[in-house]
Image (tube, grey):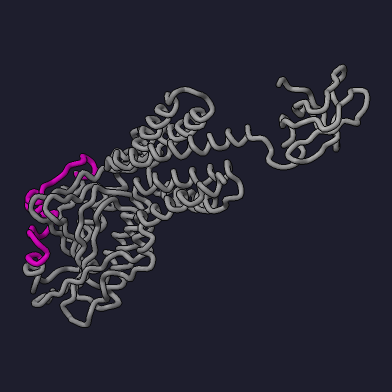
Amino acid sequence: MGSQALRRPLVCLCVLVGLFLGFPALAAAPAASKADSATDTVVRLQIDGEIEPVLAEYLVNGIEQAARDHSRLILITMNTPGGLDTSMRQIIQAILRSPVPVVTYVYPTGSRAASAGFFILLSGDIAAMSPGTDTGAASPIMEVAGQTVQIDETLRKKILNEATAYLRSYVSKRGRNVALAATAVTDAKAFSEQEALDGKLIDIVASSPEQLLSELNGRTITRFDGSMTQLALSHPVIVTREMTGREKFLSRIVEPDAFFILLIVGVLGLYTEFTHPGMFAPGVIGLIAIVLALYAMHMLPVTFTGLLLIVVALVLFVLEAKFPTHGVLGVGGVVSLILGALMLVKSPMTGMGVSLGTALGVAIPFAVIVIILMKAVLRSRSWKPATGREELLGEEGEVTEPVDPDSRTGMVRIHGELWRAAAQPGQKIPQGAHVKVRAVDGLTLTVEQTKA
């Protein structure tokens, strides 16, 4: 009964989590259609958030598709705090080898292209920024488990020298200020849009994509291979390529909030299966959620402290169910789980992590469900067996034939059934007396007389 009562709310909870994670996106068609046959088609790709493998895959695929469709121009709008070096290099490599000219554009107002975003911005055939934006601060950061790692001076120089050499390798061919660009790496300098324009780091400051394309119309640019190309954008048609359903789903998983929810659902599902064997559905859903959480953990800077606090919270919830602490351990578990969520994902470069709203929204229901499940398990251990001989222990009945301790000729009626009965040594029980079963030996019950 307990397992059946718990199955429906748990399945509903997991379905809601699936909807939150964006499972419908798997069946959705890409929002943007292929570039049409218009010669002035401009394909717009978007960088909005941390630069990570899923985003890199989206950009690389978008650039390659634009080349196959013979688009006139690729416009990459940017608003990013930075990201992974490996993903950044994949994007830059795709930009540099693209047969279609690429414009990198920090947009809209208030956006930034920091750290890895600075490298990508300067890799475009045309680099542009909108008013009220900034770029730079591109010094590499070494992180392990979400924490900045202190490195020795020799290793630091090697990393900085390699990063600046990589930057020089394509910035010089774009005709931009190599020396000033290098200071963003060596000295972590940042630049406003006007400072970047005056320092010849970018080519244009434009307030909108339409204004940017208008200024680019008829402009002759030098490609990475040294060839000259004139941009003909008299009637540009901007086609925005959104992420595919698969890319949206994977990018959703690697968000800190979604990762935390997947982790909790996985733990809860497996915990439910272990405490209520045979339900199957919670165990299957929990296992899938844990695997997806491990995928996200590979991408995110996850801290050991956050994971440890979540484990402590689970232990406190179980102890709360076992001991009458009047909620002290339960409250401590909720606090531990919230702190663990807030500390679970932390990047000094971006400040990203699990939001407080998500931590609160998950911690309290999780605590209630775990405590209820454990109480149900403990309560079931104290239940008497409902079938078999053991159910007769402690039951009361009436003597129909006198019970003599020296023989087994007595009879008692229990649950409407007649059983042969034996009394304890030295006790003789008359007919009509009320007795209680103390032991079961085959088909004979050992009974003792109860007080009237």
Q: Position of residue 397 (x, y in %)?
A: 75, 32
Q: Residue 153: which quarter of the image? A: top left
* Residue 103 among magenta residues: no
Compared to 125, does 280 lie above or below? above
Q: Which residues are magenta?
A: 184-212
Residue at image coords 15%, 56%: 107
Q: Position of residue 130 (x, y in %)?
A: 10, 56
* Residue 197 among magenta residues: yes
Compared to 173, does 350 lie above or below? above
Asked if residue 142 shows in the view, the reply is no
Q: Along the horizontal axis of the image, is 313 left or right of 204?
A: right
Q: Along the horizontal axis of the image, is 160 left or right of 136?
A: right
Judged from this view, the residue extending furthest toward the right is 407
Judged from this view, the residue extending furthest toward the bottom is 37
Of residue 403 and residue 35, the one placed in the foreground of this image is 403
Q: Along the horizontal axis of the image, is 298 left or right of 357?
A: right
Q: How many marks?
A: 0
Judged from this view, the residue extending furthest toward the front is 432
Of residue 2 and residue 450, the one placed in the foreground of this image is 450
Of residue 155 and residue 278, the one placed in the foreground of this image is 278
